[in-house]
Image: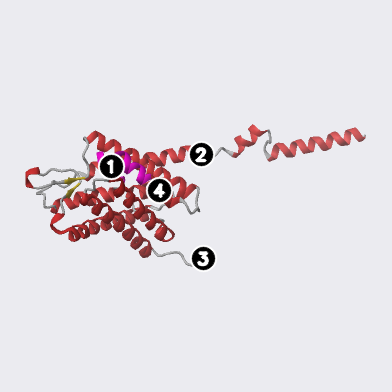
Amino acid sequence: FEDEPRPSMASKLLSEFLGTFVLVLTVCLVVVQASASPLDGVVGIAASLMVMIYSLGAVSGANFNPAVSVGLLLIGELPCFDCVTYVISHLLGGMVAVGTAAAITGDRWRVVLVSNADPRLGKVVQAGKGSWGSLFGSELFYTFVLVFVVLNFAVRDAPNQYYGLAIGFVILAGGVAVGGLSGGCFNPAVSFALDFGGIFAVSGPNKFGTSIVYAVAELAGAALAAGVFLAINLKQDKGEYEYEQGIGSDDEQEVQTDSDDEGSKTSRA
């Protein structure tokens, strides 16, 4: 496989679109059912992400998340053009996914990111239920954890065959921990899709734009993850390392060798 040509940009963008579509569609269908056992839904979401990572990771890197793409950009692993086009693919994939979920559920679509509707107009399935502070903090922290894990398992420790499992378990842990507060998005494409879907939810008119708060928190988490990743992966300067080990520079070694030779000649004399 080493001699195979690299995937084209079109293949990469289609991969990112498809992976994000499957992830967001799963999220939407889980949320709309408002299961009495949230853990079941979180397991389904984490599993959908894992299988798409393993399926498409070799094509595009399987970002499926603007926060992950931004994190890779900040550490120099993803070119700026690729990052921008990936993010566009993520957002489009999320929008198509929420439209598909609404079509599947029909008149049951009542999902909003954060409710602005009059509850008397119908039952609202709201993803974010906490205060704005808890929403922001939850999304920032677990997006940080998610991106940090991606950078370490899929970049520093690559190649390996367990990175998808590790990423899926982050979603599982975060969903269980703060899913009841923020909805456990950890992904601007997911929060944007749910916000977009709230526009045509049958629960009544919903104000579009609350996903901006989520996106700010999630991108801040990604930036923090990139900074911590770079900090813990600092490499010691070679000269400083040699000095500490008592090795010395090449010039110093040559001078020492010449001195030893002269000393040997003097002794023989």
Q: Where is mark 2, residue-wise?
A: 234
Q: Amino acid at mark 4?
A: Ile
In the image, is residue 216 above or below residue 165?
above
Return the disc, 3 or 4, that comes first in the chain's sequence. 3
Q: Are marks 3 and 4 in contact (CB under 8 Å)?
A: no
Give the residue number, with chain letter if any, for mark 1: 179
Q: Which residue, given by chain and number where applicable, does mark 3 sit on?
A: 1
* Camera-side mark, 2 or 4: 4
The residue identified by callout 4 is 167
Marked residue nearer the N-terminal end (3 or 2) = 3
Q: Amino acid at mark 2?
A: Leu
Callout 4: SS = helix
Check whether the beta carbons of the residues at disc 3 and disc 2 lie within 8 A of each other.
no
- Disc 1 secondary structure class: helix
In x, y percent, where is residue 237?
Answer: 57, 38
SS of the residue under disc 3 = loop
Q: Classify the position of the C terminus by image quarter.
A: top right
